[in-house]
Amino acid sequence: MPPNYAAARGRESARTMILALFAASVLWARPAAAATTAMQPNATCLRRCGDIDIPYPFGVGPGCHLETGDWTFRLTCNRSEDGRLRLYNYKIEVMDMSVRLGQLRIYNIINPWCYNATTRAMNEQHNWWYNMSITNFRINDAQNRFTVIGCNSLAYIRSLNDSADTYMTGCMAMCPGVSRMENGSCAGVGCCQTAIPGDLNAYRVSYEDKFNTSGIASFSPCSYAVLLEAAAFDFRTTYVTTDAFMADNDGKVPLVLDWAIGNKTCEEAKLNASAYACVSSNSECIDSKYGKGRGYLCNCSAGYDGNPYLLNGPTCSTAAKVLFLNPPTCHDINECEDGRFSYPCSVPGTCINTIGSFYCACPDKTTGNAYNGTCEDKKTQIGWQIAIGVTSGVVALIVTATCLYMIHEKRRFAKIKSEYFKQHGGLLLFEEMKSRQGLSFTLFTQEELEVATNKFDERNVIGKGGNGTVYRGTAKDGTTVAIKKCRLSNERQKKEFGKEMLILSQINHRNIVKLYGCCLEVEVPMLVYKYIPNGTLYRLIHGGRDRDRGVPRIPLALRLRIAHQAAEALARSTLEELEEEKYLSSQFLLVLGEDRLEEILDEQVKGEQSFELLEQVAELAKQCLEMTGDKRPSMRQVAEELDRLSRWSQHPGVARTPRRFWHCLVDRRARPQK
């Protein structure tokens, strides 16, 4: 730079500085004018000291800062020391300040405790303190840490005054070995950090005498303790072995302070308009994070930027624009042009700023999503809209048709179920159920039985026969049940089915399976009865699938006992209400009429009992198959006859006819009598 230019700049700066001091002295002597709102700075107030901007409510000199009854916002600017900015009446140097965050960064002094090689002892230890309790400053507990550096160092930080709510904590830095220290690590080896409580505005620091560097002065002569901004600190191992910590930082480190306006909440402050600090029409009030009684802050509303504590717009002094610049109040942010923001619209879109906001628009003759999509020619867009409209219409039509079809099918199925219910005697069943009280008979739905049998899975089949298929299932209450799909041969059976099932459900006998209910709304009616895990009677007698696996022989006596017990159960039940069945075994009657009984007997009973006993059993069966009901014995008579035959079969005096002589008996009986 040319010497003459530098000299000229120096003379201009001197004149500017003199003018600033003169204006400040005039303002100091002028009494404050009455105002209806919080006091506002005038255009001549100093707004920059050295390289640091001074936003309102801070200011240098009377009339340039917000008056809150303390020295929170009053600063001093020392021009002789390269524009050092300090808090008024304090030796605390200010680094910068933020109106939006409500923060102030200052320099905090580093206090070392060192070994004196001359006296061969530690320097006299002294406590040092920090007290801003008469201001609205609070030490930010989130961004600051109490930090101790050294190899045998223990320091304490505590409340300034001992009281019931005294705060105290400490941090110890040790060095098991110099090689164990790491740059950037402050975890106890050479460096230690600890958090501080919130709402702290005064403290004192001291070292523990028992931990000093007198024995390690050759490689670590000093200990350091200071409260500092954690983000601005980066530990170096040379801080322990040399005086680099003091030298590199000029004996001071950053510390973050929070500030607020007064000691009232937003709602309380708004009641006094003359003192309320949020004067910008585009501002909002925020209560201090430290709670009630700790003041409030002002912020610009969303979409605005600037200083919420100012009423007027940007003005400046013609004498010194740089020194007297007054930052603007909350003003609209031009999101479309502000370099702090990325372009908010898509590439073809056009950003249009509005008061407090913005919007994105597509260029002329185009349409689309200008925010994060694409803008297309309107003709193309219209074509797409037509295609989308037609497609949407077709889809809507299909959905509507599907819904209508489903409703129709649902109604059709409901009608079919109702018809089946009527066909299977459901109406008669209802009438019977109304006339009888205390019935434990359930009408199951098709859906319930499908769930119980897993949609009638073949793996759940436990029996098949001429009268239907039986499935194992699980009822809603977890009970295992047997579910039988019946086969009905004629209309009479269908109409009487429901009523007869109700009658059967009332049978309570140990030899008859309990019937729980039925399902009548299906083409093939279904029964639900108690599940018997030990298999069927058919399987017991004939063996079923296990016939070739050595099934135990079932003697005739046991067979007669089973028949007798079944007849007893039927005789004692209310089955006389049921219609008589007309099923006859024509094959049995034919064989019996031709005296060929042996041909149809089970191999297990042939030769076991006397042929006379077997003939009497067959004769009883023949009587039960009489075509005329009057000629058939009653169930009670059948039970009594079976009981007699059963006792006869067990009598030791009953002679057994060897199987090889049966044909003789049959032949003899077949000859005509003379």
Image (cartoon, grey):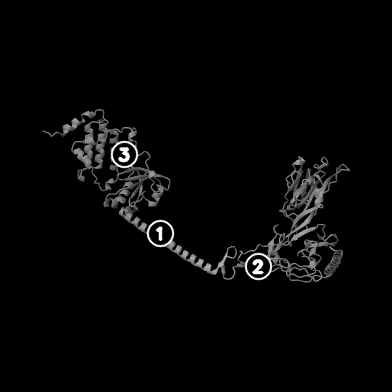
Q: Would you name the residue on which mark 1 appears? A: 406
Q: Amino acid at mark 2?
A: Gly
| Circle 2 residues within 10 Å: few <14, some 14–19, many ≥20 | some
Q: Secondary structure at mark 1?
A: helix
Q: Amino acid at mark 1?
A: Met
Q: Quadrant of the C terminus?
A: top left
- Look at the image and tell me whether residue 113 can be seen: yes
Please identify, in this view, whether the residue under mark 2 or under mark 3 is nearer the observer: 2
Q: Earlier in the sequence, mark 1 or mark 2?
A: 2
Q: Would you name the residue on which mark 2 appears? A: 356
Q: Secondary structure at mark 3?
A: helix
Quarter of the image where one finds residue 404 = bottom left
Q: Which mark is residue 232?
A: none
Q: Would you name the residue on which mark 3 appears? A: 538
Q: Is residue 36 above or below residue 182?
A: below
In three-dimensional space, the C-alpha distance between marks 1 and 2, rounded to whole angstroms, equals: 53 Å
Tell me whether circle 1 and circle 2 mark residues in contact (CB < 8 Å): no
Residue under the image location 25 percent in, 46 percent down: 581
In three-dimensional space, the C-alpha distance between marks 1 and 3, rounded to whole angstroms, equals: 45 Å
Q: Earlier in the sequence, mark 1 or mark 3?
A: 1
Q: Position of residue 140 (x, y in %)?
A: 73, 55
